[in-house]
Image (cartoon, rainbow, N blue to C red):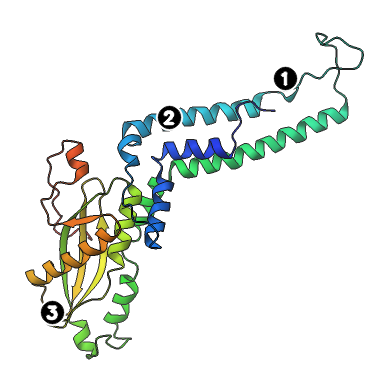
Amino acid sequence: MMRGSLNGATSTLVGLLSSSCCLIQLILNGLSLLQVVHVGCAGFQTWLGGTTRLYIRSVSMVWLVTLWARALFTHPKKHIQPQAKGTSCCTNDFEFDGSTEVHLLSRRNKSKLRLLCWSVWTLFLMWLPEGLQFLDSRNTSNVFPIRALLLDSAIIPSSTGGSISQEKERHVEYVSFVVDNMGCEACESMVKRILLESQHHEQEDDAIRLDMQQVTVHWETGLAELQISSSSSFTSLDKENLQSELDARLRHHGYALYPLGHITKKMQLMDNTIIPTPKDNPFQ
């Protein structure tokens, strides 16, 4: 009834192009977590990001508005030109009876419902990158708030075998690294998940325990800022050991971790010579 109406394939294609194929990157990240395939960043943002994404989104929004305008303000009779018995094909004297009107209205309502469902799906895919960033901004840590509350109130025993008073005397350190091979918001979410899963790191040689409390990641610059709680003073050797372990975890999933000052591939592609620098305390 409505020419150019949305269907599943068109809706998905428009949504993917408008989000630089964010959903595909999320699927690849999920397969990496399941140990099926480790691709890292597939590079969709390189071709479909920036001004290209803005242009595609603008065209897609105009297209959606046009579809809805036609669906809401076009009379259903204009879409059907039935031929009555005994009349010529060029005759316009055909009259719609009551049952025909009801049938047309029913078809029109079903078409509107389909258009609504596929429009919501298109918009969901279109704004998926911003949704990921919003969720990540509200979840820099998956255990820190509850764990800190319990430790400060001395409700739970020490998990390292020491007394509660010893557990409360932990040192908070802020360390920063540069993560390469990130190209979009989905990669940023994946890297943050990997870093947050690196909880309770044990230094076997001197029994130093490190807990990852909060993590912030910026995919544009590759900057990763970590808030770490340690059972003793955090030395340069501890930082090197931590960097080696985190780098191994990230490389397993297609990413890489470097010290501050490293120029990422994305920055090289953009001819950006600005070296990322951490804030004094990014978690305040």
Q: Looking at numbered disc 1 in the image, what kind of residue is underneath it?
A: Lys
Q: Does any portion of residue 9 appear in the rendered image?
A: yes
Q: Looking at numbered disc 3 in the image, what kind of residue is underneath it?
A: Ser
Figure check: 106 above or below 186? above
Q: Residue furthest left?
A: 236
How packed is label 3: few (under 14 Cα within 10 Å), some, or many (20 or more)? some
Q: Residue placed at 64% from the left, 29% from the top?
A: 71
Local SS, label 3 = loop
Q: Residue placed at 25% from the left, 55% from the top?
A: 255
How packed is label 1: few (under 14 Cα within 10 Å), some, or many (20 or more)? few
Q: CA distance from mark 3 to mark 1?
A: 78 Å
Q: Residue placed at 45% from the left, 27% from the top?
A: 59
Q: Residue 172 appears at what percent x and percent y?
A: 17, 71
Q: Residue 47 appears at what percent x and percent y?
A: 33, 35
Q: Looking at numbered disc 2 in the image, what kind of residue is underneath it?
A: Ser
Local SS, label 2 = helix
Q: CA distance from mark 2 to mark 3?
A: 54 Å
Q: Does any portion of residue 140 appear in the rendered image?
A: no
Q: Residue 137 appears at what percent x and percent y?
A: 33, 55
Q: Tag on residue 58?
A: 2
Q: Which residue is mark 1?
A: 78
Figure check: 137 above or below 84? below
Local SS, label 1 = helix
Q: Along the horizontal axis of the image, is 80 left or right of 116?
A: right
Q: Which residue is mark 3?
A: 232
Q: Residue furthest right?
A: 86
Which quadrant, please, contains the N terminus?
top right
Q: Along the horizontal axis of the image, is 112 left or right of 282?
A: right
